[in-house]
Amino acid sequence: MNVMMLLEMAASGFGDRVAVQNGSDALTYSELFGAAGAAASELSASGCERMAALDVNSLAIPVGLFASAWAGMPFAPLNYRLTGGELDALAARIAPSYLVTEAERVKGLAHLPDTTVVAREDFLARATTGKEGDPSWSMDPDEIAVLLFTSGTTGAPKAAVLRHKHIVSYILGSVEFGASSEEDAALVSVPPYHIAGIAAIASSVYAGRRIVQLPGFSAEAWIELARSERVTNAFVVPTMLVRIIDALENSGDASLPHLRALSYGGGKMPLPVIEKAMKMLPGTDFTNAYGLTETSSTLAVLGPDDHRTAAASDDPPIRQRLTSVGRPLPSVEVEIRDPEGRVLAPGERGEICVRGEQVSGEYLGRGSSVDADGWFPTRDGGWLDAEGYLFVEGRVDDVIVRGGENMSPGEIEDVLLEHESVADCAVVGIPDEQWGEAVAAVVVTRADHPVSEVELQLWVKERLRSSRTPSRIEFRNELPYNETGKLLRRRVRAELLGES
Amino acid sequence: MALLKVGTRLRSAVCNTEVMVVAAPQHDVEVSCGGAPMIDVAQERPPGGSASPDAAQGTAMGKRYVSEAGDLELLCTKPGEGSLGVGEILLRPKDAKPLPSSD
């Protein structure tokens, strides 16, 4: 098994179709296959052991992904926002590497030991004019395809290891070969160092869908590209959707006439945002995808029909499903477990554990956290409803323990977000002499909707219970997020405690 | 007969079909296509063969084929006229449940 096989099938099935497009540059499936082969020869000749890409979405990303697979090297996309010591540390962990980056960065990276730094344009020029390689990639399913440094919201970045068997299993289990029509186009705006960016390439290639790359996200650029390129499918993280919806509203033209399917994931989607998005784009199918880097992307989906049924229902348990991540893929099993590892019943909160061939659960140099029976504890907390819909309530490590009672920040945040004055919020536990931990909240209010601490406390108390009511609420202009929309809770907590 | 390995690629001896092993049973198995045992993808197809009429429904690109027990699964990476099987029994195409595109 090798992810190259996905591209080989696409090149032989629909070689003349455009595979990937970036501005006025494009590669057909045949050209992408050829470029991967030529670049693979270059990688093999370099003597390096890994390929790294310190780049925005560019043609070098799909070419690099497949060329690495062809050459039998792990592909490591790096966060292009990293500089200085952080970047040096990551580069050291993957050396000796062949690192492709933007031309203007080449000089500044010359000091990296055991790293061959190549400008993106030179890499692509050699790939597209070089001699086609011999199609003889390894089919060993256990070789490493991709190394992804996780966002490190809870500490130093760890490199998640995705082997060929994980990615290929994910694609075979979730995508029908050649299912897309020639008119279909997927807009990829998540950065390449995010699992969704990698999954988008593999899925689109296998489906035969044209990938339209957006190098740097802005809502205006995204909307413009979606319209001009007649984009039919896209994936966004919640913060992107918030901005897109705002921009559509402010421009007075909410039409995205070609966009059939918009999927979202990578963080918690506030209920008011998805409700508004569905109203503004009635012709678009929404899908919520829940997954982790360590699971080769999507584990569970809340599909378009689920969205419509939930949004139209007055029955609270059904309506609540709009805040769920739907049901597991057919190839994935989900269990909720307590801290002792016992499997919990529907409705009970615990840790989400998953099993399936796409699940890696492995970090470079740290081994696998998958147990003997194949189960991976995600460290995400959540619960299943009676019909198997999965609700995710944030990281287990973020759970607040107040006087022996466990509470998830997500549950309290959901209630706060339902208040018309609350635009955004974060709930964290802070040390408390009496209770061990106390519930604290930081709230961003909507312009022209002032609200007091007491009003919000009452709002939560009426809907949950008094123990879950934040004893302290502070107001801010914005919350700290990383660039892919993950809330940095550690920073919220540190700030509340006066540590930053 | 031999133990199949996941990731192994096989070629039909009588048509253009090529497959990759996606799941393999823990016991020896001989996979056939068009009624003739499949060969390693690195080998050349012998000239002049054709699919036997009982195994000529054809294979489709990207389709997965499974054994009755479900322990053998092959992905068709190149289509041809022959049908995949083990012994006399043909593999059946695996029904794929359509999923919404999630990435």
Image (spheres, rainbow, N blue to C red):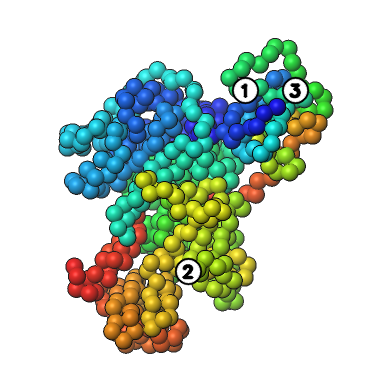
State whether residue A359 appears in this view: yes
**Residue position marked by numbered label 2 in the rendering:** A339
- Horizontal side, residue A297 vs residue B4: left or right: left
User: Please, what is the three-letter code of the amino acid marked with disc 3?
Assistant: Ala
Query: What residue is at 41 percent from the left and 40 percent from the top?
Result: A146
Q: Is residue A308 depicted above or below A433 in this figure?
A: above
Q: Chain of mark 2?
A: A
Q: Secondary structure at mark 3?
A: strand
CB atoms at circles 2 and 3 under 8 Å apart?
A: no
- Horizontal side, residue A388 vs residue A382: left or right: right
Q: Position of residue A48 (x, y in %)?
A: 32, 29
Q: Residues within 10 Å of mark 3 (few under 14, many from 20)?
A: many
Q: CA distance from mark 2 to mark 3?
A: 54 Å
* Image quadrant where residue A301 sits: bottom right
Q: Secondary structure at mark 1?
A: strand
Q: Is residue A296 depicted above or below A140 in this figure?
A: below
Q: CA distance from mark 2 to mark 1?
A: 49 Å
Q: Which marked residue is nearer to the observer: mark 2 or mark 3? A: 2
**Residue position marked by numbered label 3 in the rendering:** B36
Q: Secondary structure at mark 2?
A: loop
Q: Which mark is residue B70?
A: none
